[in-house]
């Protein structure tokens, strides 16, 4: 169980990171901004 949970978490994390990268690429600015706010 624990393995699959951590696996799902890592996948979700990668998806989130990818979405953020995409958003920052589309937005142009706010490259470091959203990252620093949520971190």
Image: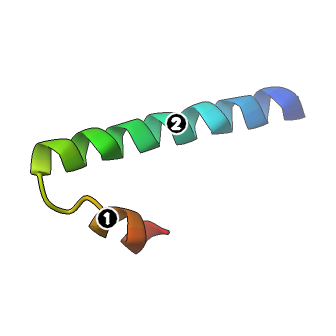
Where 20 falls versus 39 (above or below)? Answer: above
Q: Is residue 15 left or right of residue 3?
A: left
| Residue pictured at 73% horizontal, 30% vertical | 7
Q: On the image, which quarter does residue 35 sit in?
A: bottom left
| Residue pictured at 46% horizontal, 34% vertical | 15
Residue 33's spot in the image, x, y percent? 28, 68
Give the residue number, with chain letter if any, for mark 2: 14
Residue 2's spot in the image, x, y percent? 87, 35
Q: On the image, which quarter does residue 37 sit in?
A: bottom left
Q: What quarter of the picture does the N terminus occupy?
A: top right
Q: Tell me whether circle 2 and circle 1 mark residues in contact (CB < 8 Å).
A: no
| Residue pictured at 14% horizontal, 60% vertical | 29
The circle drawn on residue 12 is none
Q: On the image, which quarter does residue 19 sit in?
A: top left
Badge 2, how many Cα within 10 Å: few under 14, some, many 20+? few
Badge 1, how many Cα within 10 Å: few under 14, some, many 20+? few
Q: Is residue 38 left or right of residue 9?
A: left
Label 1: which secondary element: loop
Earlier-in-chain disc, 2 versus 1:
2
Q: Nearer the viewer, residue 36 or 38?
A: 36
Residue 30's spot in the image, x, y percent? 20, 63
In this view, the residue farthest toward the bottom is 37
Residue 18's spot in the image, x, y percent? 39, 36
Q: Nearer the viewer, residue 37 or 32?
A: 32
Where 17 falls versus 38 (above or below)? Answer: above
Q: Nearer the viewer, mark 2 or mark 1?
A: 1
Label 2: which secondary element: helix
Give the residue number, with chain letter if any, for mark 1: 32
Colour setting: rainbow
- Calculate the distance from the C-alpha at mark 2 to the C-alpha at mark 1: 17 Å
Q: Is residue 11 left or right of residue 5?
A: left
Q: Is residue 19 left or right of residue 38?
A: left
């Amino acid at each position: 169980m624990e393995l699959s949970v951590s696996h799902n978490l890592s996948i979700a994390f990668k998806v989130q990171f990818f979405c953020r990268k995409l958003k920052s690429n589309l937005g142009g600015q706010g490259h470091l901004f959203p990252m620093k706010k949520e971190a």
